[in-house]
Amino acid sequence: VGNDEGLSIEVDSAGNSYIMGRTNGDISGEGIVQSYSYFLAKYDTNGGRIWIHQFGNTSDQLTKLAVDSNGNSYIVGSKWKTIPGSSRATLDPIIYSYNSAGVQLGVTNIVTANSDGATAATVDSANNLYLTGWIEYPRSHPSGAYDTWVRKYNSSGTLLWSQEFNYLGWDKPAAITINKKNSEVIVAGNASIYPFVFRMSPATGTMLNSATGTAYRDYLAVDTEDRKSVG
């Protein structure tokens, strides 16, 4: 028993629910007790728990969960690392993968020279995985700024493309989804104090168009059925 916090929820094609969260107790009964770790639980359509597992540790900052049509789960976020020869700690994106039976398939650390992290993920009808996140101190912008990156992986975990955008500076993407009619990739978030949304080609990751709010409290929503972005 501990303090538990749900962070992300998804439903698979069979109606099973998957919940990812954080705990400082042994919520799974696997004997894992740390200042905090993460859990992934699967529930059937009647609310009965099928399985639950704990993973990760205090060096992780996990944010989102995505589930494909086969019931494979992908938990994304960031992991702290210490730069060799330096006392400075930075972040790298990380992906935890589980199959439909709750068996961990792997842990993918995306190691880069900069500090960056994954903030959202989604899958398409072919079970390709799309990630978005932020990167700090990119070469294309003054120190202290953040750019948006988007990556696409196939169902085998092979990177198909990676794109980075210097949008408005201080970018923080918050969500990514797939257009149901034309498979375009849609990313939304905030740049400085303004919300943004842009559409990308699923084949190459090329940006197709974008929209930006004009005031601090503007918002943008995405209608994935007919390609419209509204604010």
Image: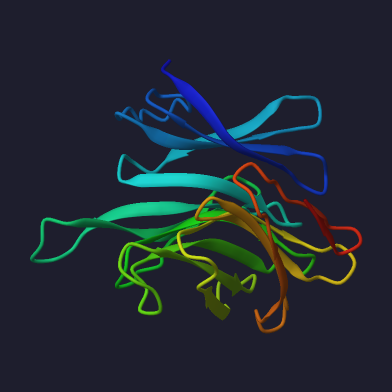
- Check the image and report above or below for 81 versus 29: below
Looking at the image, which residue is at 66% across and 49% down? Answer: 100
Front-most of 167 and 130?
167
Q: Quadrant of residue 227?
A: bottom right
Looking at the image, which residue is at 68% across and 46% down? Answer: 218
Looking at the image, which residue is at 56% across and 47% down? Answer: 64
Residue 119 position in % (x across, y down): 52, 53
Question: Count the marks: how many?
Answer: 0
Front-most of 218 and 56?
218
Tell me the quadrant of the picture where the N terminus can be found.
top left
Residue 41 position in % (x across, y down): 59, 35
State left or right for residue 139 relative to residue 72.
left
Front-most of 188 and 127?
188
Farthest front residue?
215
Residue 140 position in % (x across, y down): 40, 79
- Report whether residue 127 is seen: no
- Check the image and report above or below for 81 versus 219: below
Q: Quadrant of residue 123?
A: bottom right
Please, which colouring scheme is shown? rainbow
Farthest left residue?
85
